Image: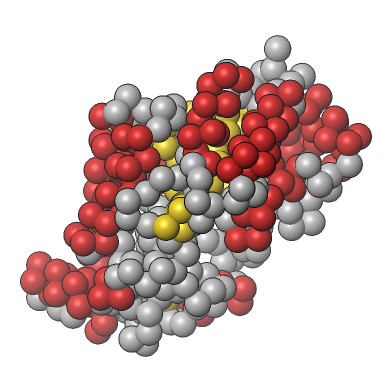
């Protein structure tokens, strides 16, 4: 008997990881069954497999976007997870428009440039435009209507890294407050209003997604930025989730033009009851950083099950990971989620055994 109710793992099927599953439907289905049965053997009871990424290619049958594999990966995932008694929430990345299906909806930064997914040339849709939201909703609907999954997992459910100054944002804000937001900075009278306008707009959209997902009897989970410190913060330069941070006040690694923002006010989403599980991406080898999130996160996630997402990347080793899992158990967290399956299976058999034994203690 594990102290954790949720022993979860993300299954990355994006980018080069797509090659882990064959485009041949027979061989591919066999690989997917093996992945799920491996998860079951290791004691995981919740999986988040990636089914839609920023390039606009899917791992499911879509009428709107291209299925990367040409066969229905998600159908096999759902079927095998059900047979194994594993809860499954398809993991969906919002806003990326790598297929450039809707250039008229792309987000625009304060220099007038298209806002791309971080470290890529993949454009993103403006998260506030009704047409962007409708496009994303139509993809979400396809998944929840066609597949017997237990839930739906929201990722990149935030602004990518910059406020949006597209025509829609500017017109909407100007018509409500009488000022063009491009003229505002942290000393402006309407600065709080501009921040709230963005954060609340995203919160309202999460409410719509949540209602849609739940109308099909499914749960809503999300991959979220941590409360408290982030690994590359310094004590005087904390990350802020729900408002704009002038980039000069931030760690150089965050430097993105003049302003940095994600507007991910997930504590409000939990308070409003939009999320069933909050999975916090705290990927760091540092125990003190995980501890801070374990201390502040559950209160912020009130109303949702708090799951600590721990990385198998970025300098994490078996020596740093095991104390993190033990800490999460001591703090009584609902669960732990590892990032991700394909990293886990690359670790040695004995390290994997230690992880699994600790998760199941
Ligand atoms: Zn916009």
Q: Is residue 213 above or below residue 96?
A: above
Which residue is most to the bottom? 111
List x then y, in percent, for residue 249. Answer: 51, 75
Residue beneath the point at 47% across and 64% down: 55
Q: Quadrant of residue 215?
A: top left
User: From the viewer's perspective, is residue 222 above or below residue 252?
Assistant: above
Residue at the image point whose x is 43% and y is 82% from the top: 258
Q: Is residue 57 visible?
A: yes
Position above or below: 102 against 91: below
Q: Which of 213/276 is in front?
A: 213
Instruction: Give how far across and how far down residue 261 sits, in percent.
Output: 42, 66
Quarter of the picture containing the C terminus is: top right
345 horizontally vs 334: left or right:
right
* Residue nearer the viewer, 244 or 220: 220
Please tell me in which quadrant of the rendered image residue 254 appears: bottom right
Q: Residue at x 26, y 61 (%)?
A: 132
Q: Quadrant of residue 213?
A: top left
Mark count: 0
**Left or right of 26: which side holds 298?**
left
Find residue 326 and report its horizontal and vertical position in percent: 75, 30
Q: Closest to the observer: 345 or 177?
A: 345
List the single residue furthest toward the right: 350
Residue occupying image coordinates x 8% and y 71%: 175
């Amino acid at each position: 008997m594990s102290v954790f109710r949720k022993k979860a793992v993300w299954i990355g099927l994006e980018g080069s990881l797509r090659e882990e599953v064959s485009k041949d439907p027979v061989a591919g289905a066999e690989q997917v069954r093996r992945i799920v049965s491996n998860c079951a053997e290791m004691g995981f009871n919740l999986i988040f497999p990636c089914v839609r990424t920023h390039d606009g290619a899917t791992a499911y049958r879509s009428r709107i976007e291209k299925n990367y594999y040409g066969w229905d990966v998600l159908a096999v995932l759902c079927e095998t997870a059900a047979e194994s008694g594993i809860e499954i929430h398809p993991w969906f990345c919002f806003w990326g428009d790598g297929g450039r299906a809707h250039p008229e909806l792309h987000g625009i930064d304060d220099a007038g440039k298209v806002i791309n997914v971080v470290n890529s040339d993949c454009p993103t849709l403006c998260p506030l435009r009704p047409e962007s939201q409708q496009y994303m909703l139509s993809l979400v609907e396809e998944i929840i209507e066609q597949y017997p999954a237990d839930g739906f997992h929201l990722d990149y459910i935030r602004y990518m890294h910059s406020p949006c100054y597209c025509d829609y944002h500017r017109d909407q804000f100007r018509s409500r407050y009488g000022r063009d937001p491009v003229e505002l900075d942290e000393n402006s009278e309407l600065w709080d209003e501009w921040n709230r306008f963005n954060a609340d707009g995203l919160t309202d959209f999460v409410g719509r997604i949540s209602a849609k997902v739940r109308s099909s009897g499914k749960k809503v989970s999300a991959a979220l930025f941590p409360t408290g410190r982030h690994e590359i913060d310094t004590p005087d330069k904390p990350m802020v989730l729900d408002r704009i941070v002038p980039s000069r006040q931030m760690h150089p690694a965050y430097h993105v033009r003049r302003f940095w923002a994600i507007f991910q006010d997930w504590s409000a989403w939990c308070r409003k009851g939009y999320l069933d599980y909050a999975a916090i991406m705290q990927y760091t080898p540092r125990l003190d950083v995980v501890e801070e999130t374990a201390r502040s996160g559950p209160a912020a996630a009130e109303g949702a099950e708090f799951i600590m997402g721990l990385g198998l990347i970025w300098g994490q080793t078996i020596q740093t990971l095991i104390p993190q899992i033990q800490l999460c158990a001591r703090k009584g967290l609902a669960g732990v989620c590892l990032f991700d399956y394909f990293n886990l299976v690359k670790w040695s058999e004995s390290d994997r055994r230690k992880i699994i034994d600790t998760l199941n203690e």
